Image (tube, helix red, strand yellow):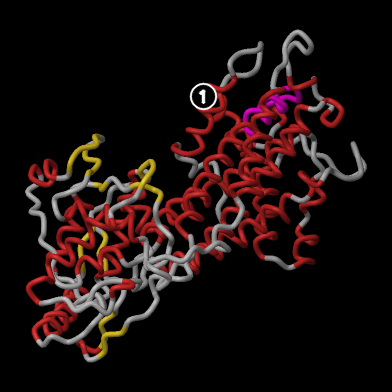
Amino acid sequence: MITLTGNTLTLKEIRHVLFDLEYVQASKESLARVKESRKAVDEIVATNKVVYGITTGFGKMSDVWIEPNQVEDLQLNLIRSHACGVGDPFPEVVSRAMLLLRVNALLKGFSGVRVEVIDILIECINKRIHPVIPQQGSLGASGDLAPLSHLALVLLGEGEVIYKGKRMPSKEPLKREGVDPIVLSAKEGLALINGTQAMTAMGVVGYLEAEQLAYQSEAIAAMTFEGLKGIIDAFDESIHLARGYPEQVDVAERFRMYVKGSKLTTEQGEVRVQDAYSLRCIPQVHGATWQTLNYVKEKLEIEINAATDNPLIFDSGEKVISGGNFHGQPIAFAMDFMKIAVAELANISERRIERMVNPQLSGLPPFLSANPGVESGAMILQYSAASLVSENKTLAHPASVDSIPSSANQEDHVSMGTIGSRHAYQIIQNTRRVLAIEWFCAMQAIEFNGIENMAPRTQKVHKKGREVAESITTDRVFSYDIERLTTELKDSDWKRLLIHQ
C-alpha cells in the first residue's frame, strides 16, 4: 500500500502503482488539509466573494459573475465542454498515472475540493477503472485541459474507461465496483483539469522506459564491441576521470564490467590502433544521455508533487491567488531534452549496426549472412534501423519552442509540453526497436567469433536473446525476430543481466 501525502510521491512508488498495481491511500494529514481548504471555498460561495473559477467564468470569461445557484452547472459545463480531445487514447498505464498524479496534487490541500473527489479518484486507481483519454488536444498551459476533462468525465459517470481489458462506458464498471459517481461542487471541475498531469504522466512512463533502455543499450553495445573486437583501452578509467563527467565515468565502469573476462576484446595496436567513434565514444555519448535523463528525473520528481491548478488557496482561505502553475514549460523542456537524449542512443546504435553488417568495416561475412550472395542476411535490418533513426530526428524537433494563443488571446503563451511528452514516448519505442536490431546483429556477429570467447555477463545477454530469436542460418522474415526482441526488451525482467550503479 502506497500512502499519498501530496508531497512525498517518488518515481519508485509510481512504478509500483503502475506496473505492480499497488494500492494507494491518502494520509490523514493530507485529508485534513483537503478539508481545511474546502471550508475556504464554501466560505467564498456563501459570502459572494469574487474569486476566479469559483464565482466567475473561465479564461476570457473570468469577468462574468456566476450566481450561487449556477455553481454546479458551471463546473459540469466546464468538464463537458472541455472534453474535446481527439486521436488515439493514451496507453492505459498513462491513464492510471494521470489518476495517481491528479489525486496526489489535490492532496496538497491548495485546491479546495471535497474529500469525495479524493475518494473516487483513489477508488478508480485501486479498482483499476482507467479513463479513456485521447492523446491530442492539449496546449500544455492552463493545464492539460482536454485530456484531464476526459478523466473527470469518468468521475461523473460519463465518458469511457478501460476495465478488465475492455473499453466501455464508465457507468457499468463504476456500478459493478460499488463506486457512486459524484456531482461536482464549486471549483472542483476546475481543480480537476487545471494541471500538468497528462504531460507529466506521459513523461513519467516515458522516463521509466527510457531509464531501462539506457541500461540495456550498454549491455547490447558491449556485445557489439565483442563482435567487432573492440579496443578496450578507450574505456580505461583514467581517460574518463580526466574529463570529469560522473555519468561518463559510470558508463565506462559498467562497460568494463560487462566485457570483463572476454577473449574477444583487443588492446590498441593489436588489431588496429583506434576504433570508430560509435565504439570508442560509447561512454561519452551514452554518458551524455544519462546526464539528460538525470535532469529529466529531477524535474519529474518536482512536478509529481506540485500544486499546478488555479487559483490556489493558502492560509485557510485568507489568500486565494490566481497564478500560472498550470503552465507546463518546465516539463516541456524536460521532454524535449529527453527526446534528443534517447534519439542519440538510437543514432549511435545504428552506426554500430552498420559496422557489423558492412564487410569492409567488420571483417565478418557480408551482412552477417550464412550464405552471402544467394542470401541477403541482415542487409535490410540496417535499413529499418536507419528509417527509425531518421523518424526520430523529425520527432526530436522541440515542441516547447512553439506557442499558439488561445482563449481569445487571454492564454497567449503555451508550452506544448504534452506534444513533447508524446513525441518522446514515440522516440523511446523507435529506439527500442533499433536496439533490438543491434542485439540481433551482435548475437550473430559474436557467433562467428565463438560464443565461448564471450565475457560471462554478455553470454547471459546472448542467451536471453537466443531464447526468442534464432541464429541466421538462412534468410527468413526477420521482422518477427525484431518484434520478439523488442518485446523482450520492454517486458522481460532484466534485473539479473544489467549492471546498475
Main secondary structure type of the part rendered in magenta: helix
Which quadrant of the figure has residue 91?
A: top left
Q: Which residue is mark 1?
A: 468
Point 39% across, 76% down: residue: 324
Q: For the magenta stretch, what is the residue range?
A: 438-451
Mark 1 is on which residue type? Val
Q: Quadrant of residue 475?
A: top right
Report x, y in % for residue 132: 28, 45
Q: If the image is split into quadrants, where does the C terminus sit?
A: bottom right
Residue 282 vertical placement versus 240 (above, below): above
Q: Residues within 10 Å of mark 1 (few under 14, many from 20)?
A: some
The relative height of residue 8 versus residue 400 in the rendered view (above or below) is below
Q: Is residue 69 left or right of residue 371?
A: left
Q: Nearer the viewer, residue 120 or 481?
A: 120
Between residue 153 and residue 59, name the one nearer to us: 59
Q: Is residue 229 left or right of residue 211?
A: right
Image quarter in which the N terminus is found: bottom left
Residue closest to the far top: 374
Q: Position of residue 58 (x, y in %)?
A: 28, 71
Q: Is residue 229 visible?
A: yes
- Provide the secondary structure element on which disc 1 rests: loop
Q: Residue at x 35, y 47 (%)?
A: 134
The residue under the point 65% across, 34% down is 387
Quarter of the figure with residue 479 = top right
Coordinates of residue 396 in the picture (x, y in percent): 61, 51
On the picture, is 362 further left or further right than 45? Answer: right
Residue at point 48% right, 54% down?
419
The answer to whether any part of residue 7 appears in the image is no
> Above or below — where is 498 with respect to 67?
above
Front-most of residues 248 and 346: 346
